[in-house]
Amino acid sequence: MSDALPALRDHLAPVEDLKAAAAVLAWDQETFMPDGGAEARAQQLSTLQSQAHEQFVTDETGELLDRAAEATADADPLDDGAALVRVTRRDYERARKVPSSLVAELSQATSEAKQAWKRARTEDDFSIFAPHLEELVDLSVEKAEAIGYDDEPYDALLEEFEPGLTTADVASTFESLREPLVPLVDAIADAPQLDDDLLRRSYPQSTQKAFGEQVLADLGYDFDRGRQDVSAHPFTTSFAHSDVRITTRYDEEFLPTAFFSMIHEGGHALYEQGIDPALARTPLAGGASLGMHESQSRFWENHVGRSRPFWHHHFPQLQEAFPNALGDASLDAFYRAINRVEPSLIRVEADEATYNLHVMLRFELERGLIDGTVSVNDLPERWNAAMDDYLGVVPNTDADGVLQDVHWSMASFGYFPTYTLGTLTAAQLTEALRDDMDLDARLADGDFAPILDWLRTHVHRHGRKLTAPQLLERVTGQELSADAWLRYAENKFGALYNLN
Amino acid sequence: MSDALPALRDHLAPVEDLKAAAAVLAWDQETFMPDGGAEARAQQLSTLQSQAHEQFVTDETGELLDRAAEATADADPLDDGAALVRVTRRDYERARKVPSSLVAELSQATSEAKQAWKRARTEDDFSIFAPHLEELVDLSVEKAEAIGYDDEPYDALLEEFEPGLTTADVASTFESLREPLVPLVDAIADAPQLDDDLLRRSYPQSTQKAFGEQVLADLGYDFDRGRQDVSAHPFTTSFAHSDVRITTRYDEEFLPTAFFSMIHEGGHALYEQGIDPALARTPLAGGASLGMHESQSRFWENHVGRSRPFWHHHFPQLQEAFPNALGDASLDAFYRAINRVEPSLIRVEADEATYNLHVMLRFELERGLIDGTVSVNDLPERWNAAMDDYLGVVPNTDADGVLQDVHWSMASFGYFPTYTLGTLTAAQLTEALRDDMDLDARLADGDFAPILDWLRTHVHRHGRKLTAPQLLERVTGQELSADAWLRYAENKFGALYNLN
């Protein structure tokens, strides 16, 4: 037996430990850290991240990869060793192509841009942010050029989040989604609105927490390998498959805020908790892509949590938990309330149907920024025009428009489309899952184990061994497509809004 | 200007960041980490610690130290740069002397010994732990030989916690403490016992937390640069002078458990929060020694928290917080209750007077283990004989005797004496402080700012720039001595127990 693979693993494990340590520090920063700790924490995180990067891009990593490649040359692509070499080499070559000076420039520029973005949003003044955004666009194009691409520079940026997918793939999929979706949303907007007043009653936080955590445990989230805390923006973080934590935020006068964020983050966490332990401390211990990760959160949030069969089982428990707010409510009224669709201005508050339009708008604009067809100065106007076009609503302020999201201030171009890729993938996976079991019957029985088992077997355990397109093909026999989600949405909202 | 000092600082800062990151991970491990995270966390901590060590002991550190030494050759010893070179070189030379193979052996052996100690304590069977302890003694002697010493190997181990102090210093100081202390404790034991029943009433945890944190804030602990959580064993940890956290544990049927642990840990935390920010991210950002650290916790716990003037101000507030438990209690009865002295078996539950006897017993035994005059197999018998001799009580089981403390399973020989060094130093510092202000009047007014200012100026801000003996000499004009504490104890307990 060659020792090439063990040597590669031994070399990579400490790098993964440094990244996990950074994740712990970042989690603490968002949950428990006192305000005074911010400056020191930024330095500690910077040290951990740069040391992890430096140790990863050494020549030694390349030599160990070459030796391990020989040792696994004849192995199956799903063999752990072969996948480790393939995926690590992809990360390695990408990381080596970006010069350290550019990494440092981007780090400095995003740090300044984030401060400027915060001020711009508070003061509702896009001009404060504009020069920073221009610099980030320039540096990101420079990064894309350094990495290389086939068709357009955005490809190189997208690849960081969605290996194996091109800008053209995303654009054509989104096109086939948008064409039927805009008229669907229009039709919903013209139909009599659903009433969600019953969600806006008094919901004490401690009861929300107890009910939500019971549901999370029922779904299969293992609290011996995780915990839930409060943060300003909900997130999931993993320090190991055996320590995957989620956060949420509460609104005592709007039930969905915490509940659906809990099962959304719970979906991300179930993915991380389900990765094969044999992949621990390697670059394979993560999700196939951001889109595949989002498919898991959207599956549990929407296909489970916003379904009628789920609440058939859980609504009586919810009524018992909140007798004052829901004692007089019917299951039907509750189901309609949690599925109310209404075109609105803010992405993170958007409903299941309109959310994708928010995402597509951002994708189109940032693709244009990177290929030079959209200028930063035109952005607010382009934003508002697209909002009007897709959603029929226009923000009164840039703070509620082009300045609402943090992503561009972090130079995370290529991130936005993954939200909708996740939504579409979730629908495709759900159809495949329905071929194998009666999902509605399982949900109506509160019997989640077979559902989670199916996801574990088909998706979770593989970690990053396959790309998202490879995994999707393997599970569904299909390429990425909007069809499954459109079938789901037209069926669900058609019935809810009597659209025929 | 030479760039030698900035270059040294730039080289050391990331090492300090790695250590701070390890401290965050260790804090999380004791407070919030789910059980499942233990194995991965141990690996992450091991990586951070070994990388910090490796980066510190490089030849480059030595070269930078040499260059910086030239640049600071003419500086005052209290100059930041000169102190940085001096203290870092001390750490560096010590770290370089211990071979990596021995570090690894000790790490492995302590890991196994800690498991064995836990089992031995649960099963009350010293023989489970004995062979591990023998190995740890052998490895520690080997380490002492590698480091070198003047008189006896224990010197080299003590130096890790108390730079500038020798075993002979400690032994002679302890001797001069023990001689009058044993008869004092005997006399107290023969006197009519003080009643502490009123401390054993019902004290709801949330009120204990609110009252204790208010006192901490009053003392000057800055909650914007810290926080308090719950852990099995209370501790203080610092990630920067701007993020210093404490933990406590609650007993709803015994008020002192949480309250005195809070101000004890608060004392440690005030030290760390008070270190000059200019020393951040250098090896100077810490306490002068474990004993000097303990002097700060003991000062606030005992000279403040168990004093009559402190409660003159705070007892009415405490009564208001706990009207059911304390509404009918008098200040005098409360003061007597919190100062009850009673020889007992367990160090961490011991009172202010008998605590030192627990420590001296451990110091004598571990010194004997290291110089070969005490064998591991004789330890239980020696322990029980010394307990009888010093305290007049003998444990029925080794679990309540020689197996009660974790320290030896971690090979922390040299740690125990620092508890009593801290107690003695606190008394010496208190006498010096009383020369400068009317401490009792300040306490009776609840006016802590001048007290904390005095400690900041004389002790805290210097960090590790001076050793404990240097700092003590500078502040009090004295060497370490038991006299001040004996004056304090004979005066306080003489009055409480009518000993004359």
Image (spheres, coloured by chain):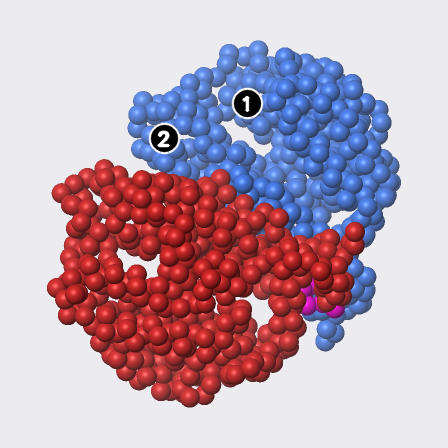
Chain colours: A blue, B red
Q: Position of residue A271 (x, y in %)?
A: 57, 48
Please say whether residue A15 is visible from this viewpoint: no
Residue type beneath disc 2: Pro
Question: Label 1, on which residue?
Answer: A493
Name above or below for residue A495 compared with residue B24.
above
Q: Residue at x 73, y 29 (%)?
A: A363
> At numbered mark 2, what does the secondary structure look like: helix, strand or loop?
loop
Name the quarter where the C terminus of chain B is drawn: bottom left
Image check: A281 left or right of B460? right
Compare marks 2 and 1 and give the one earlier in the sequence. Answer: 2
Read off the chain for label 1: A
Q: Nearest the camera: A93 or A188?
A: A93
Residue type beneath disc 1: Phe
Q: Position of residue A446 (x, y in %)?
A: 41, 41
Q: Nearest the camera: A466 or B196?
A: B196
Please say whether residue B304 is visible from this viewpoint: yes
Q: Nearer the viewer, mark 2 or mark 1?
A: 2
Question: Label 2, on which residue?
Answer: A204
Image check: B495 left or right of A426? left
Read off the chain for label 2: A
Question: What label does residue A97 carry, if any?
Answer: none
Q: Position of residue B354 (x, y in %)?
A: 28, 68
Q: Position of residue A205 (x, y in %)?
A: 39, 33
Name above or below for residue A420 compared with residue B322.
above
Q: Residue at x 75, y 29 (%)?
A: A132
Q: Main secondary structure of the magenta part?
A: helix
Asked if the stretch drawn in magenta spans residue B59, the answer is: yes
Asked if the stretch drawn in magenta spans residue B151, the answer is: no
CA–CA distance in space, label 2 to label 1:
30 Å
Mark 2 is surrounded, within 10 Å at the Cα level, by few (under 14), some (14 to 19) or many (20 or more) other residues, namely some
Identify the magenta region. Answer: B55-60
